[in-house]
Amino acid sequence: MQLKELTKAEEEIMQILWALKQAFVKEIIAQMPKPKPAYNTVSTIVRILEQKELVAYKAFGKAHQYYPLISKEAYSEYKMKRLMKGYFSGSLSNMVSFFVEKNEVNTKELDALLKLIKEKKK
């Protein structure tokens, strides 16, 4: 499967489907912030996600219950690799350095990262 960057609206719906595991369009809309989008808008976006082979459905008469075909972890990995490639020359150390220099990482988080690195080295 060839992953592609999701639009903001597509990603919002995928986040809901990942959380719920499966949902009808009405259930997706119920999880969205106000002002709620129109049913047809959400239905169209879900069908686009289906065409992109990111979601599938089970039919219950005329109603469709949608579920994700890709895990949140797999999409997160794809998105992070694109971020690293696009902004940090594909380097994890460049990305971490950026956040450290911007004071976005506290010492507790740095300690946790160092512990993780030490465990991976073993």
Image: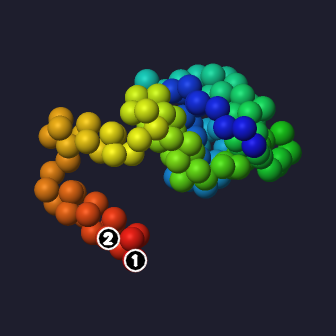
Give the mark count. 2
| Image quarter hosting the N terminus | top right
Q: Nearer the viewer, residue 46 or 71?
A: 71
Q: Nearer the viewer, residue 107 or 20?
A: 107
Residue 35, given in percent of the width and then of the height, sits at: 43, 24
Q: Residues within 10 Å of mark 1 (few under 14, many from 20)?
A: few
Q: Nearer the viewer, residue 29 or 87?
A: 87
Q: Quadrant of residue 109?
A: bottom left
Q: Name the residue beneath numbered marker 2.
A: 118
| Image quarter hosting the C terminus | bottom left
Q: Name the residue beneath numbered marker 1.
A: 122
Q: Residue at x 40, y 70 (%)?
A: 120
Instruction: Answer above or below: position of 12 versus 44.
Output: below
C-alpha gap between disc 2 and disc 1: 7 Å
Q: Quadrant of residue 28?
A: top right
Q: Residue at x 74, y 33 (%)?
A: 52
Q: Nearer the viewer, residue 72 or 82?
A: 82
Residue 39, given in percent of the width and then of the height, sits at: 63, 27
Q: Residue at x 72, y 28 (%)?
A: 48
Is residue 38 shown left or right of residue 1? left
Residue 88, given in percent of the width and then of the height, sits at: 39, 33
Amino acid type for the residue under numbered disc 2: Lys
What colouring method underlies this structural image? rainbow
| CB contact under 8 Å: marks 2 and 1 | yes
Q: Residues within 10 Å of mark 2 (few under 14, many from 20)?
A: few
